[in-house]
Amino acid sequence: MYFPSWLSQLYRGLSRPIRRTTQPIWGSLYRSLLQSSQRRIPEFSSFVVRTNTCGELRSSHLGQEVTLCGWIQYRRQNTFLVLRDFDGLVQVIIPQDEKMPTGEIEIKVKTAELLNACKKLPFEIKNFVKKTEALRLQYRYLDLRSFQMQYNLRLRSQMVMKMREYLCNLHGFVDIETPTLFKRTPGGAKEFLVPSREPGKFYSLPQSPQQFKQLLMVGGLDRYFQVARCYRDEGSRPDRQPEFTQIDIEMSFVDQTGIQSLIEGLLQYSWPNDKDPVVVPFPTMTFAEVLATYGTDKPDTRFGMKIIDISDVFRNTEIGFLQDALSKPHGTVKAICIPEGAKYLKRKDIESIRNFAADHFNQCSLLGKLRLECADLLETRGVVLRDPTLFSFLWVVDFPLFLPKEENPRELESAHHPFTAPHPSDIHLLYTEPKKARSQHYDLVLNGNEIGGGSIRIHNAELQRYILATLLKEDVKMLSHLLQALDYGAPPHGGIALGLDRLICLVTGSPSIRDVIAFPKSFRGHDLMSNTPDSVPPEELKPYHIRVSKPTDSKAERAH
Amino acid sequence: MYFPSWLSQLYRGLSRPIRRTTQPIWGSLYRSLLQSSQRRIPEFSSFVVRTNTCGELRSSHLGQEVTLCGWIQYRRQNTFLVLRDFDGLVQVIIPQDEKMPTGEIEIKVKTAELLNACKKLPFEIKNFVKKTEALRLQYRYLDLRSFQMQYNLRLRSQMVMKMREYLCNLHGFVDIETPTLFKRTPGGAKEFLVPSREPGKFYSLPQSPQQFKQLLMVGGLDRYFQVARCYRDEGSRPDRQPEFTQIDIEMSFVDQTGIQSLIEGLLQYSWPNDKDPVVVPFPTMTFAEVLATYGTDKPDTRFGMKIIDISDVFRNTEIGFLQDALSKPHGTVKAICIPEGAKYLKRKDIESIRNFAADHFNQCSLLGKLRLECADLLETRGVVLRDPTLFSFLWVVDFPLFLPKEENPRELESAHHPFTAPHPSDIHLLYTEPKKARSQHYDLVLNGNEIGGGSIRIHNAELQRYILATLLKEDVKMLSHLLQALDYGAPPHGGIALGLDRLICLVTGSPSIRDVIAFPKSFRGHDLMSNTPDSVPPEELKPYHIRVSKPTDSKAERAH
C-alpha cells in the first residue's frame, strides 16, 4: 500500500476498528442531535459504499470490518491519520508493526483509495482557527465544513422538519406553495422587480405570501402553511438578507387565542432536545403595558429592571428639574432599579449612563435603551443578567391599528398592514377616532427580538374597502382581486409568520443570521463567493425591453 | 331564531346531529386520504371554535352537540340546508316541527351565526359545472373550493410530507435552502433577471440549485435535499410554468445505483395509499435501447407495440421502396405490430396513419410518434392500452455526454449540463472521440413523461476544466468559484431532481400541471386573477438604474 504526501485529501478505506486513542470530538456533540442506537435512524450509510460514519464507531464495533469515507484531518508520517466526516473524527492506523495505542477504538487499514486531492486550504477546518467573515463567505464551501455551520444547518433542518410534522401530521395543515413572481403591492417600495418579456411589464418578488394566504382561506383550504421564501430590498441594512424565510401560517374560523395556542404548541414540539423545554403558555402583555414597563415593544424579559413610575413620590418635591417635568401635561418621573447597582457600577459607569441618556434625550424609547445599556454594563462587571440558555417568550397584543404617517402626520398608515382586523371593542372608533383604534395584531418576542407577528384579518369586504380607500387613501384598484374575493363568502381567518432565520439564530446562539444560512449575502447584498450581482451583456437585456440608465455614468463607476 | 335569505353564506352553528338523509359526497372520498378513526390524527378542529368538520360526522356522533363552520351549499326554504367545508357536506335541519327524514344523521340547529355574506358566484362550486379555464384562473379562490382542487393540493402536501419523512427522518438528509438571487450561468438565456441597486448589476433567478448542491457536497454536508423553487423564462410554452418546483437531491460517495435505489424507495414510501403500491426496482434501459425499441427517450411502457427491426426479412425483397431503404448505409426496415389492428382499425384509420407518417417523414422520432398515434386510434376504438390506474416507471441510462451544437454541428454542447461525469468506461474517449462518450446521466420516466433526471458529477477539477474550456469552449471565469471548490478536496458525488408539478399531475390524473398548483400562471405567463405582470411607474425603476426601452413604442402598444 502506497501513501503519497497527503495534506487533507479525500480518503476511502476498508478497514477494521481497533482501540481508539481519542474521543470523537464532533461525534459526541452530534450525539445530542442524532439518535445513538446501534442501528441508527436516520440511517446515514444507506445507498453509499461506506458502512459507517466516522463519528459513529464505538467499542461495540470492535473487530468489525468497516468502510469509511472522509477527509484527512491530521496525519503523522505514514503511521496514523485522523479521518473526518460530518459526523465526527476517527483515528486510522496504517499497519507498520502491531503498534496498539491506548483509547477506545481505532481503524486498522486493510485497503485505501485516494478519491481526490486537495490544494492548500486558505484556512484550516478547525474550531479555534479565527477567520474574517469576508474570507468565510468567499470560501463558503470550506466554511460549511466547520463544526458550527454543520451543527447550525442540521439543527435548522431538523427543527423545520418537526414543525412540519406538528402542522401537517398532527393538525391537518396543508403545505401550499404560492408564487414568488407576483404583482407589486401598493406602496411596496422594497420589492425587487423582475422584467417580463412584455414591454414595460414587471413581476415583483413579494415580501410575504400575505395576499395568497388570505385567498387560500377564501378558497376553503381551511389551514395553510408554507416555509416561504420572501424578498425585501432594503439596500444595506446590517443582519438583514435580501431573501429570507418565514414559517407562514393561516387558519379559518380562528381567533387570536387559537393562533397563540397553535404557535406555543409548535415551538414546544419542535424545540431541540439539547435545550431546556419550552414552557407554555407564554405570558402576554399589551402594547401599552410593554411600553410602560420596558420602554420597547420587544422587551428582553430574561431579566427584570422594569421601568417604574415614581411620579407620586416626587409630587411635592422641591428638586427643580423634577418639578419641571411633573408640571407638564402627561409629565412623569420614571426609574429603573438596578439590583446591587451600587456594588457593581463604578463612577465612570454612572457617567456613561448619564451621557447615554443625554444622547438619546427626548426619544420616547430612551428608558428602554437605557435599561439594555445598564444590563450591558452590569454584564461587563460579571453579573449574569441574560442567561444564554434561557429562552423567554412573550406575546405582545393590542397594538394600535394605525400610526400617523411619517411624511404627513395628519394622515394615517397601517401600523402593520391594511388587512389587519380592528379590535372587536374598537370597531366604532374607526368611524370617529380611528387613531385610537386597537388592532387584532400580535407579536411574538423572544429574548428581546421580534420573531413573529400576525393578526386576525378583515373578512368583510365593506370594512376592508372603507379602511383602504377612506382611511388609508390607497389605490384600491391594485387590490381589486382581494376585495372581490372577500365579497364571495370569505370566512373569518387569521394567521402568523415566524422569522425562521432569526429564530434559528437565537436557538443556536449565533452572532448573525448569516451563520444559519448556507449561502448568505453580505450586508451589501453581495455573494462574495461567486461575485453576485454581476453585469449582463446588453443583448441579454433586450428580450426584457430594459436598458441600464446611468445618468451620471462616471460617478457611478467611481462609487465602486 | 331568524334566518335571512341566504344564498351561499358562511355559517357557524352549535347543533346536534340527528339522522342524516344523504351520504357526505366529499367526505367519503377524502376518507381514503385522511384517517377515519373517532379521534382523528391529524386533528382538524384544534385551535378553532368548531368541534367537528362537516364531512367527519357519522352515526357514532348521534346525540352529541357539535359546532360546525362552513359554507351553505344548498338551502330549501328555511327548513333545511346543506353545509359544506373542505372535508365534506352535512345536512342541517332548522326545527319547524319534529320532522325526521330518513338517512344516517343530520344536524338539528340550536343556534346559528351568519359569519359573512356572499355575492352571486360567477360559477357554482359543483363538480358537474363546466367552466372555461380562463374563468377558473380569474376566480382562482373560488375554483380552489372545488373537490378536485382540494384533493390535488392536499394530496400534493401529503406526498411531499412523506418524501421529507423518508429523506430526513429515515435517511439523514439535510433540508437546506439555497439562494434564488444568484449569478447568471454561462449561456443561461432562459434565466429571469433581477436588477440590483448597483448600476448595471443584476441577480438572476436560477433554473435549479445545481451549483449550490455541488458546493454543499464540497462543504461536507454529505446528504442534501430541498423542495426547491426554480425559474425558467421560456416565454409561451404550453403546460410550462415560469416558476416550478423540484425535489432536489445530492449525495456524497454515491454511485448511479445508489441514487436509483434511493429514488425507488422514496416513491414507494410516499405513494398515496389510494393508488396501487409502487413495485421496485424499476426496469432500466439504455438510451440506445429505448430509441431502438420505442423511438423516444421517454417511452410510455404501459403498453407494448414495440419497434421491431425486420430488415432481415426483406433482405431479398423485390419491393422497390424497401430495396431502396435497405441499400442505403445504416438503412433499415422497422415495424410496429398493432395487436388486433385488423379488427379495430378502419380504412380511414390506416389512411390517417399514412398521412401522419408522411407529415413526419425523415424525423428520426417518427416511429415513436407513430406508436403513440396508433395507440390513440386504438383507444378511440375502445381498446384500453394505457390504463390510467397503472404507473409504469423506467430508468433510462447511458445517455451521450455531448451532442452536436444546433447552430454549429461541428462544435459540441452538453447533452444535459457540463457537470455530468463521463461513463467510467468512456473517459479515454474524451481525448479521442468525445462525441462517442456516454455519460453517467439517468432519467426517470413515468408513463411516457420524464419526471426526473440526474447524474454522477465530475469531482475532479482538471477534468471539469478540460470539458468546460477545451471541449465546450465555455467562459470558465463565470464558474471559477465552482472549479476552485473542486480543487479543495471535493468528494465524489451525484444527485437527481424530480419535477414535482409533473409527478403530482400524473399521480392525480390531472389534465394540466395548472391543476396541481394553487396559483398558476396562464400559458403566456400571466396571473389572470391579479393582472400580473403589470406596469411600474418610472420612479420605481430609478433605484434599479433601468429604463424601459420600447424601440417601436407604437407597435408594442398595439400588440396588446
Image (cartoon, coloured by chain):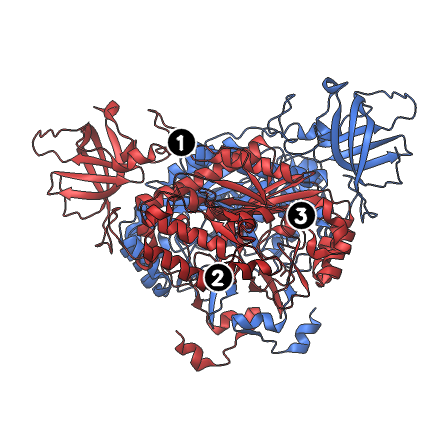
Chain colours: A blue, B red
Q: Earlier in the sequence, mark 3 or mark 1?
A: 1
**Nearer-the-camera pick, B426 or B8:** B426
The residue that mark 3 highlights is B214
Type of the residue with mark 2: Ser
Is residue B281 shown left or right of residue A512?
left
Disc 2 and disc 3 on one polypeptide chain: no
The residue that mark 1 highlights is B42
Disc 2 is attached to a residue of which chain?
A
| Numbered disc total | 3
Query: Which mark, by number, is residue B404?
Result: none
Q: Position of residue B5 (x, y in %)?
A: 14, 48
Q: CA distance from mark 2 to mark 3?
A: 29 Å
Type of the residue with mark 3: Gln
Q: How busy is the neighbourhood of tag 3: few (under 14 within 10 Å), some, or many (20 plus)?
A: many
Q: Which quadrant is home to the C terminus of chain B?
A: bottom left
Q: Position of residue A297 (x, y in %)?
A: 50, 47
Element under label 2? strand
The residue that mark 2 highlights is A204
Q: Position of residue A258 (x, y in %)?
A: 38, 37
Residue in view at x 46 percent, y 80 percent: B553
Q: How busy is the neighbourhood of tag 1: few (under 14 within 10 Å), some, or many (20 plus)?
A: some
Q: Which quadrant holds residue B543?
A: bottom right
The correct choice, above or below, for B329 with respect to A382 in the image is below
The correct choice, above or below, for A336 with respect to A94 in the image is below
